[in-house]
Amino acid sequence: MVWSRLLAATADLAWGGSCCGCGRPGPVTCPSCVETIRAGVPRRVTGAPGQPPTWARGAYADELRATILACKERQGLGLVPLLAELCLGSAAAALNDTWPGGAVLLVPVPSSRRTVAERGFDLTGQLARRVARGLRPLGLEVSAGRLLRLSAGRDQVGLSATDRTANRAHSMRVVPGPPGAVLVLDDIVTSGATLAEASRVLRANSREVLGAAVVAATPRRRPPHPP
């Protein structure tokens, strides 16, 4: 489409015409990095107590990490379709394992108004809408709905796992929306505290939470071996 080519050209000019994944001269995401990112297979990841069954398409590292950061920190709206494609794989894996039949509502983890304003778009909202469109041809009755709103808490970046859990406690509220079981969507899972809180508040409001789907999962640090 013309608008997508225009976005890519504009991004090339703004970012110096190099791949955000490998840094080589060329498009915003070069074919080699796209192929590497797409090769990731959805896998189930564990995290904080209360985190729903969660699937991630890849590790938050290397080319995938660079692509997500470019999308979030450099107003990379043109990278949303690729991230949504990855999240679609996670969502399909999650539903394949947990879907009991009937309507499914994809609920994005909410971003603050400040974050949305700085980026120029709502990343998780965009992911939910695109993933819903991608799942419908599979015969699922699926839609995207912003059931969650932020009510408290600060940004999670830089916090420890314990602080993340405390920061997310009672940080969201549920608003009315369409009926259906819920699959929570986010771009990254780190400690799992955000997904656990989203799941808790949704269940407290009588929503069936099937699980969660994310683009990437932060690799867990292994404790050092004793001497």
Image (cartoon, grey):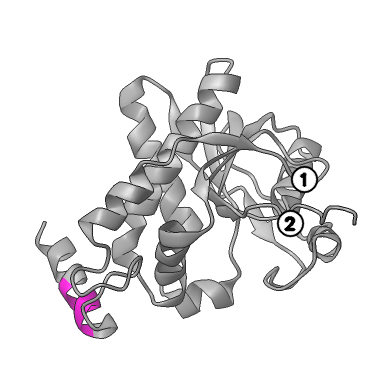
What amino acid does circle 2 point to?
Met
| Tag 2–tag 1 contact (CB < 8 Å) | yes
- Magenta part of the protein: which range? 9-13
Quadrant assignment, res 19 = bottom left
Q: Is residue 10 magenta?
A: yes
* Residue at position x 46%, y 29% in the image: 92
* Residue at position x 72%, y 50% in the image: 192
- Of the 4 image quadrants, the one containing the N terminus is bottom left
35, 126: nearer the viewer:
35
Mark seen at residue 225: none
Check disc 2: other Cα within 10 Å, few if <14, some if 14-19, many if 20+.
many
Give the labeled residue for mark 2: 172
Q: Earlier in the sequence, mark 2 or mark 1?
A: 2
Magenta stretch: helix, strand or loop mostly: helix
Q: Secondary structure at mark 1?
A: helix
Give the labeled residue for mark 1: 201
Measure how far apart labels 2 and 1 are at the Cα level: 7 Å
In the rendered structure, the answer to whether residue 197 lies left or right of residue 97 reads: right
Q: Does residue 103 appear anywhere in the picture?
A: no
Q: Secondary structure at mark 2?
A: strand
| 221 over 24 or under it: above or below | above
Residue, far right: 227
In the rendered structure, the answer to whether residue 123 lies left or right of residue 181 reads: left
11, 130: nearer the viewer:
11
| 131 over 11 or under it: above or below | above
What amino acid does circle 1 point to?
Val
Q: Does residue 94 appear anywhere in the picture?
A: yes
- Total marks shown come to 2
